[in-house]
Amino acid sequence: MGGYILAEVMLWLMYAMLFVALVAAVASAVHSLRHRYDSIAASNRVPRKYIAWGVAGFTVLLLLITCLAGSSQPLIINGITYTDRFWLKATDGLIVSSVILMVIAACFVIYGLSGINRKLKH
C-alpha cells in the first residue's frame, strides 16, 4: 500500500515539474522574441540568430533520428512485459539523445578550458 502511494506522489510531482518546465520554456521563448538585442550581436560579430537556430535544428534532428533508430524489442521489467513499440522507441531515443548531447557538451567544455582558440588567435 505504501509503495503505491509513493508512486502516485512521484507521478504527480513529475507532472508538476513537466508543467513548470513547459511554462518556463514558453516564457523564455516569448521573452527572447520580444527583447532581441541585435546590436550586441552585430557589434561582437557573433551570429547569434544562426547559432540559436542551428542548435535547435540539430537537437530536433538528433531526437528524430534517435527515436526512429531506437530499439522496439519488448522489455521485461519486474515481471511485466512492455511491448508498446512507440514508447519503447521514444524512451530509447531520448536516452541516446541525452547521452550524445552530454558528450558534445563535455567536448565543448574541454575545448573551452584548453585555451586552443586563444592560442590560435595570437
Image: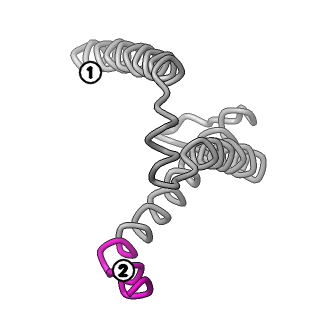
Q: Nearer the viewer, mark 1 or mark 2?
A: 2
Q: Which residue is mark 2?
A: 118
Q: Which residue is mark 1?
A: 3
Within 10 angstroms of label 1, few (less than 14), some, or many (20 or more) residues?
few
Q: Residue at x 52, y 46 (%)?
A: 42
Q: Residue at x 44, y 15 (%)?
A: 27
Residue at disc 1, secondary structure:
helix
- Position above or below: 104 against 66: below
Rendered location of residue 81, percent (x, y)? 61, 36
Q: Amino acid at mark 1?
A: Gly
Residue in the foreground of this view, choosing between 70 and 28: 28
Q: Amino acid at mark 2?
A: Arg
- Position above or below: 43 against 11: below
Q: Is residue 9 left or right of residue 81?
A: left
Residue at disc 2, secondary structure:
helix
Q: Residue at x 59, y 48 (%)?
A: 55
Q: Is residue 85 left or right of residue 103?
A: right
Q: Is residue 64 left or right of residue 27?
A: right
